[in-house]
Image: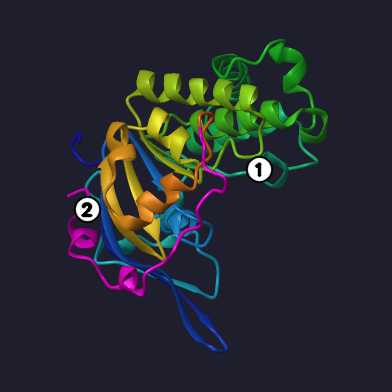
Amino acid sequence: MSAPLLTVENLRVDFVTRRGIVPAVRGISFGVGREKVGIVGESGSGKAVTGRAVLRLVPHPGRVSAKRIDFDGVDLMGLSERELRQIRGERISMVMQDPKFSLNPVMRVGSQIAEAYRIHTGASASECRRRALAMLEAVRIRDVERVYRLFPHEVSGGMGQRIMIAMMLIPDPDLLIADEPTSALDVTVQMQVLAIVDDLVSQRGMGLMFISHDLNLVASFCDRVLIMYAGQIVENCLAAELHQARHPYTRGLLDSLPRVDDTRAELPTLARDPAWLEPLAADRTAGS
């Protein structure tokens, strides 16, 4: 692993409800260098909450605590909200799952990309427009002048996701958190978007946290994989070795995947062991 760009120690996220406290993330620790790190697990495993917690974007009634969330020598837990706004977007960006809920429906997409650059750099309107058009070209959108003038409802899902990636990368961040950025796309468009992200991350020397349900996708796309279960990291392995994973939860996820050459009459279901909920020593040292 490369030198850690992000180091998280003992991260907890709890939601306070009328029935008591619900732990969503249970004291996990990990590091992310200038590499592609996949975070996988079932719905409710805590992977998306982990991504939001890094930027302290967990809404009320969620409570985020950590011994340390260190980003490039800065402890994010010790920053004020105003100081955090200088980090969000400019140095750490986050691509959400569905552009329909992330793009402003009453602003032209080009203006939204240009605004993201203006807020973080204070550049002139003409420079912001020039950089926005260049960023649209970087995410392989054709006829960028026409697309610049479109509203979000006038673009397809794949193009909308490319626009979101352009908006998040235009400030040239050091770390990109991608929360299932391709789950709503068909397979062909999905691979195109991933190729764009891969090229941009590699060219810019960024770190990437790639949150996904798709184990095969993460195994082929990422450098390392963190497997989460019930708010804990149960395994941390190289992506190339994911299919040799040893933890029974990871094995259960892999065994439940259909294969072209599968001769099983039925796919097995995952049998959960209560012992998996016990804090693991590996959780406290994963990625260190």
Q: SS class of the residue under badge 1? A: loop
Q: Which mark is residue 286?
A: 2
Instruction: Judge left or right: residue 183 versus residue 108.
Output: left
Mark 1: which amino acid?
Answer: Asp
Tell me, yes or no, whether the two marked residues, 1 and 2, touch with CB atoms within 8 Å: no
Q: Is tag 1's residue or tag 2's residue first in the polypeptide sequence? A: 1
Residue located farthest toward the bottom when viewing the structure as drawn: 19
Instruction: Name the residue at 40% across, 47% down.
Output: 39
- Classified by dominant secondary structure, the portion drawn in magenta counts as loop
Residue 59 lies left or right of residue 142; in this view the side is: left
**Which residues are the magenta region?**
262-288
Density class for disc 1 (Cα within 10 Å; few <14, some 14-19, many ≥20) is: many
Considering only vertical position in the picture, is 168 above or below 139? below
Query: In what element is the residue under mark 2?
Result: loop
Q: How far apart in space, not on screen, are marks 1 and 2 (Cα)? A: 30 Å
**Nearer the observer, 36 or 132:** 36
Q: Is residue 281 magenta?
A: yes
List x then y, in percent, for residue 148.
72, 21
**Residue 71 can be seen, yes or no:** no
From the image, which quarter does the N terminus lie in?
top left
Q: Is residue 271 left or right of residue 107?
A: left
Name which residue lies at 54% across and 48% down. 267
Front-most of residues 287 and 76: 287
Residue at 79%, 26% (x, y): give it: 150
Place of residue 271 in the rendered image (x, y in percent of width and height, measured from the top left): 44, 64
Q: Mark 1, mark 2: which one is toward the viewer?
A: 2
Which scheme is used to colour this image of the protein?
rainbow
**To which residue does mark 1 refer?**
98
